[in-house]
Amino acid sequence: MRAMPKRRSSEPGHRRKFLVVIDDTPECDRAVYFASRRARQTGGSLVMLYVMPPGDYQHWLGVETIMRAEAQDEARRVLGEFAEKARKWAGIEPELVIREGNRAEELLAVIEEDEDIVVLVLAASAGKEGPGPLVSAIVSRSAGTYPIPITIVPGSLSDEEIEALS
């Protein structure tokens, strides 16, 4: 794990930010709900990250351009839906970030680049198949060396339960 810059959210002119990874999992909704409510309660803000998988169409440049544009449109659409939820749930305007590449690497890059991000909020699946790929990857491989605290929200929590916790 690379060295991360000092977190600056407590310094004048800075604000604590909660980072949520946006994807198509059902539990993502729970992470956004918790993070937006927590940001509001603490006077912080919310960063929503959507990572597009890397394109691999080097031999078909025209196809790659079209597919990348479609993926960016989808990312903006999904981020827009979750941003609207954050506005409704907590009255906050989230910062929207779109990246392309390996999700774990891009997640760390965003944390490294924004010294105000102080907490990563993820939600664990309530299904039998396990907590989900991102939670599994972070917890099993690097949670003890992660540069910021990680909050994992159980995907089965109701709005009322999350409100009581946030």
Image (cartoon, grey):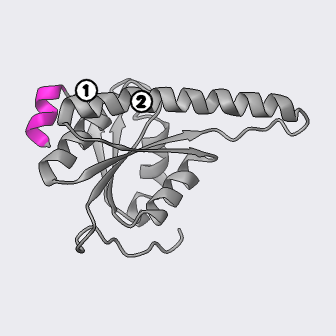
Sequence-first disc among 2 and 1: 2
Does 148 appear in magenta?
A: no
Residue located at (40% from left, 57% from top) = 143
Q: Is residue 159 left or right of residue 156?
A: left
The type of residue carrying mark 2 is: Gly
Q: Which mark is residue 80?
A: 2
Name the residue beneath numbered marker 1. Answer: 156
Residue located at (47% from left, 32% from top) = 23
Please tell me whether residue 13 is drawn above or below residue 96 in the rendered image. Answer: below
Please tell me whether residue 43 is drawn above or below residue 36 in the rendered image. Answer: below
- Crowding at dot 1, Cα within 10 Å, few <14 / some 14-19 / many 20+, comes out as some
The rendered magenta stretch, by its main secondary structure, is classed as helix
Please tell me whether residue 126 is drawn above or below residue 149 in the rendered image. Answer: above
Say which of 146 and 140 sits in front: 146
Q: CA distance from mark 2 to mark 1?
A: 24 Å
In percent of width and height, residue 104 lies at 54, 51
Q: Is residue 83 left or right of residue 49?
A: left
